[in-house]
Amino acid sequence: MHVAPAGGTTVQDHVALAEIELCGELIIAASAAREERLSLMRIDEVLKVAEEREEAAGR
């Protein structure tokens, strides 16, 4: 059995963590939705697509 050594060897994949957070936001929105499925507009709203586009345009 191999055990990771103690002391600061933790590696974080920031992209994976961001994707997990976005999935969580979608799950929360879907569970709170009255309709059966989220509309494309609602998905974009949850994922803050418009805000990201505005930021990218302003750069």
Image: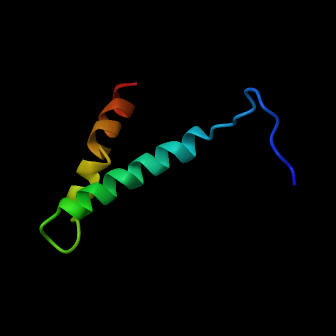
State which quarter of the image contains the N terminus.
bottom right
Across and down, in percent, residue 12 comes to 63, 37
Q: Quadrant of residue 14?
A: top right
Please indicate whether residue 33 sits to the left or right of residue 24 in the image.
left
Across and down, in percent, residue 35 comes to 14, 71
> Which residue appears farthest toward the front when viewing the image?
1
Residue sitting at x 80%, y 41%: 4
Q: Quadrant of residue 40?
A: bottom left
Question: Is residue 49 depicted above or below 23 in this figure?
Answer: above
Residue sitting at x 21%, y 57%: 42
State which quarter of the image contains the C terminus.
top left
> Which residue appears farthest toward the left when viewing the image?
34
Across and down, in percent, residue 20 comes to 47, 50
Which sits in the foreground, 29 or 42? 29
> Which residue appears farthest toward the bottom when viewing the image?
36
Question: Is residue 56 depicted above or below 43 in this figure?
Answer: above
Residue sitting at x 39%, y 33%: 56
Residue sitting at x 32%, y 48%: 47
Please indicate whether residue 1 sits to the left or right of residue 26 in the image.
right
